[in-house]
Image (cartoon, rainbow, N blue to C red):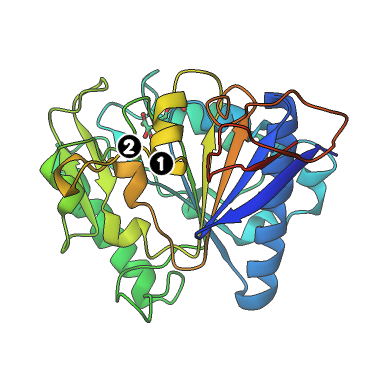
Amino acid sequence: MAAATSTEIHRHKVKVLRSEEDLALALAKYTADLAHKFIKEKGVFTVVLSGGYLISSLRKLVQPPFSGTIDWSKWYVFWVDERVVPKYHKESNYKVAYDGFLSKVPIHPNNVYAINDALTAERAAEDYEARISHLVSTNIVPLSKITGFPKFDLMLLGMGPDGHVAALFPGHPIMHERRRWVTFIRNAPKPPPHRITFTFPVINSAAHIAMVVTGLGEINAVKAVLGGGGSHGPDNILPAQMVSPEEEITWFLDKEAASTCLGVEQNNDQYAECPKDCPCCCIVM
Ligand SMILES: O=C(O)C(O)[C@@H](O)[C@H](O)[C@H](O)COP(=O)(O)O
């Protein structure tokens, strides 16, 4: 199994994996364990996917030994954000998830909540919110007792180099949406520009969030969020710094993504102090 260490910083649990391969194993185990827990407790598992590299990092979940142990019939799948393009367009997050994940496991198609790709961004966001509202009324998705917003079991999020999560980009007003469950953007800086996205009240009502970041592209954003060096007042806060689920946030980083914090060489699984004094991963593998 993957070698990793983790440490609690504020409410961030940070797992630094030796390689992307180890990260994929650790993410599969984490997701499978949560699926078992929630299915045992309440009979369903509601999981929210994102676009980007995430689906590739989830690849081991659909392989043995994990795939055979999971009761896929109890899964409900959503997207934290989606590009407003046809469902089978190469830019569609649904297509990426279908090709790399959904087509390989027996999740019931009725339990897969893709956006309605025949609508504009604004209408697709309203439609997605209405469909989630129906699931609230049928008790598949509960409302958080703390916030009154829908509470999903697990959100699997990526992060961009600018610190964006979902389609919530730095400096964009929808970062501060407080009323809607799902909103839209027509000028996303990461193409394609039209997207729908969960809002922060929904993201932060999730029980668990996994932040999955690999490679060197996001090292400055990782440091800004976990190393405490990035925010200079509420106007400059990064979206990733606003992620704060109700129960637990777990970061899955490979060595490259954590390299602004990892100041030490890997040493046969020995724990070591980070000489750079980052609060994020002061203990590293
Ligand atoms: O549709 C999308 O683009 C996203 O959901 C987005 O928020 C993504 O998760 C990050 O941009 C990270 O993307 P990478 O994993 O490709 O770095």
Looking at the rendering, the quadrant in which ligand 1 lies is top left
Q: Residue at x 19, y 39 (%)?
A: 236
Q: Is residue 5 left or right of residue 190?
A: right
Q: Please state which amino acid type lies under the numbered disc 2.
A: Gly
Is the residue indicated by label 2 positioned so its CB lies within 8 Å of ligand 1?
no
Report how many numbered discs are placed on residues in the image: 2
Reading the chain from its start, which is encountered first: label 2 or label 1? 1
The residue drawn where x is 13% and y is 27% is 187
User: Is 184 placed above or below 159 here?
Assistant: below
Q: Secondary structure at mark 2?
A: loop
Mark 2 Cα-neighbour bin, 10 Å: few <14, some 14–19, many ≥20: some
Where is residue 55? Give x, y as percent.
55, 32
| Front one among 204 and 129 | 204
x%, y% of residue 140? 46, 71
Of residues 155 and 6, the one nearer the viewer is 6
- Does residue 4 appear left or right of residue 209 in this picture? right
The residue beneath circle 1 is 225
Disc 1 secondary structure class:
helix
Which residue is label 2 attached to?
A: 230
Answer above or below: position of 112 versus 245.
above
Label 1 CA crowd tier, 10 Å (few <14, some 14–19, many 20+): many
Q: Amino acid at mark 1?
A: Val
In the rendered image, the quadrant that contains the C terminus is top right
The quadrant holding residue 272 is top right
Residue toward you, 112 or 60? 60
- Decide: is 56 above or below 29: above
Q: Kindly report the distance in space between the C-alpha atoms of the residues bearing marks 2 and 1.
A: 7 Å
- Residue 231 occupies which quadrant of the picture? top left
Residue 62 % position (x, y): 71, 38
